[in-house]
Image: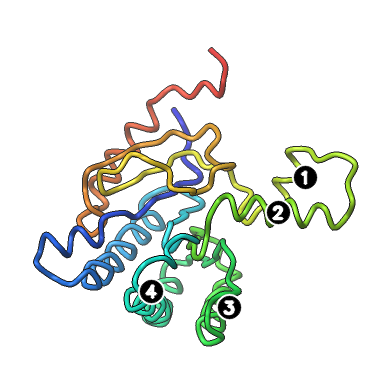
Amino acid sequence: MNQLKHLAIIMDGNGRWATNQNKLRIRGHEQGIKTVESIMTYCARDTDIETLTLYAFSTENWKRPKLEVDFLMMLLDKYLKSKLKVYMNHNIRFETIGDLSKFSNKLKERIEFTKEITKNHTGLKQVLAINYGAKDEIIRSFNKLLESSPTSITEDDLDNVLDIKDPVDLMIRTGGEHRISNFLLWQIAYSEIRFTDTLWPEFGPEELSDIIKNYTISKRRFGGL
């Protein structure tokens, strides 16, 4: 039976959910926040998952309309402020991956405060991928290595400078699209991948539980037989 240590999720479908409800796209993002809490607390309370990485905002998402981007930045700040009790009550450690330099000072302070206050928590590690792109991560990591002028670079060398070292066991994408979208390309080298048509605001612990059960009985070969 496979052990699930690192679960990564591409949270897709907020905008389409809102459109289906005849609502503004931003209402879909608000509903998606509720799903984040539901899935995060389920993983912390009812599973043995050690790391939950959620794709929240990609390096390409800056191309969206400014009003939507500004709303997403506000929503992230509001989420971290309002959900701090959830992190505290469930012993969840908050971390991020991605380039934070483009965010406002206020948002960066909120992010660092949440990391600091939860850094000693020993339960689930919940990682938000924000202003994250796998290609950008790999380029930044190689530039870190070049600072030490290596004569050659090994997999271990790169592992140690990536935003997140943990290999992904299972990746899920909601929303019906079948692509990876520049997410954790190095870390998913041998992960199991599941796609679901369920839009993120409608994705819940029951469906996640079914996917996890399917994962635990799958045969992972890692290139072997």
Point out residue 155 in the picture as x, y percentages from the top left corner.
73, 38
Mark 4 against mark 3, which lies toward the viewer? Answer: 4
Figure check: 17 above or below 184: below
Mark 1 against mark 2, which lies toward the viewer? Answer: 2
Q: Which element is circle 2 on?
A: helix
Toward which corner of the image does residue 20 lie, by quadrant? bottom left
Question: For mark 3, what is the residue?
Answer: 112
Mark 3 against mark 1, which lies toward the viewer? Answer: 1
Question: For mark 2, what is the residue?
Answer: 141
- Measured in 3D between alpha carbons, the distance from the residue under mark 1 to the one under mark 2, in whole angstroms, is 9 Å
Label of residue 157 in the image: 1
Toward which corner of the image does residue 68 lie, by quadrant? bottom left
- Measured in 3D between alpha carbons, the distance from the residue under mark 4 to the one under mark 3, in whole angstroms, is 21 Å
Q: Which residue is located at x 26 percent, y 72 percent?
A: 30
Q: Which residue is located at x 41 percent, y 62 percent?
A: 56
Q: Which element is circle 3 on?
A: helix
Question: For mark 4, what is the residue?
Answer: 69
Q: Residues within 10 Å of mark 2 (few under 14, many from 20)?
A: some
- Measured in 3D between alpha carbons, the distance from the residue under mark 3 to the one under mark 2, in whole angstroms, is 21 Å
Point out residue 59 in the picture as x, y percentages from the top left corner.
50, 61
